[in-house]
Amino acid sequence: MSLSTSVIVSGINNLSDARYCAGMGVDIVSFNLKLDSPQRVSSEELKEILGWVAGVKLAGQFERARPDVINEYASEFNLDYIQLDTPYLIDEIDEISCPVILKVYINKDTVESELLEMLELYSSVVDSFLIYSSDFTAIDETNTMLLKSIARSYPVYIGFGLTKDNIHTIMKTIKPKGIGLLGGNEIKPGLKDFDELQDILEEIEEQA
């Protein structure tokens, strides 16, 4: 199974999501390891999940955890990437032992020159940027030029405003490194509603 672009699925906290994403050819599955999150995966749960998952890169999502704590998780679970969901100092990122994916929030007040300056500042210490917005609900004329500008200069994953109907247009117009999707909670153990995730992944699935 292969997809037409690189995909990160964040917020993974159950086996159903992890196995589904691996089977669909997702590049990176990112587990919620945020220490104060009620949806976080415990060490015991993560060990169990990883025993059933293969063929996909593994990331751990953190915010506000110290670099030494992050490195302990990375070593114990053989993580390939660390996803930081909140701003960190450059010196702190430099201490992290794995390649870092930095989540960057944009909104209607984002100034392009300031955003580009920030990305340039961090580009030497991170692997890529995951662009997210809780302000914008769609990708349209209000933000397309901004996204094109940053994707032209930096390795970015677009993590908002994606649907099965616009995914191909976004990839052709903005040309990001890839896309970022979100996993979710199981309805109950082993039972998962994959509709939204499945729709987009099936849309970019390459036919043999």
Image (tube, helix red, strand yellow):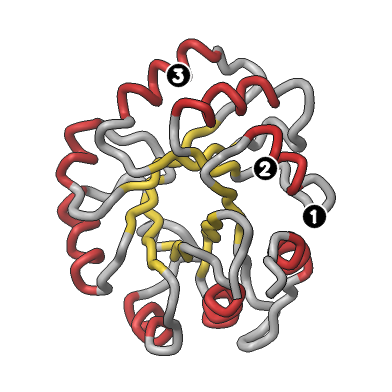
Q: Is residue 70 left or right of residue 148?
A: left
Residues under numbered marks 1 and 3 in contact, where contact means CB atoms less than 8 Å apart: no
Rendered view: 34 above or below 192: above
Q: Which element is circle 2 on?
A: helix
Rendered view: 13 above or below 105: below
Residue under numbered circle 2? 171
Give the mark nearer the N terminus: 1 vs 3: 3
Give the mark nearer the N terminus: 3 vs 2: 3
Please name the amino acid that badge 1 sits on: Lys
Instruction: Tell me residue 155's x, y (percent).
Output: 45, 38
Q: Which element is circle 1 on?
A: loop
Q: CA distance from mark 1 to mark 2?
A: 12 Å
Q: Quadrant of residue 76?
A: bottom left
Residue under numbered circle 1? 164
Instruction: Tell me residue 92's x, y (percent).
Output: 20, 38
Give the mark nearer the N terminus: 1 vs 2: 1
Please name the amino acid that badge 2 sits on: Met
Rendered view: 137 above or below 51: above
Q: Quadrant of residue 171?
A: top right
Q: Residue at the location (70% across, 26% down)?
A: 144
* Residue occupying the far right of the picture: 165
Residue under numbered circle 3? 116
Quadrant, the N terminus: bottom right
Please name the amino acid that badge 3 sits on: Leu
Q: Residue at the location (32% across, 31% down)?
A: 123
Q: Quadrant of residue 16?
A: bottom right
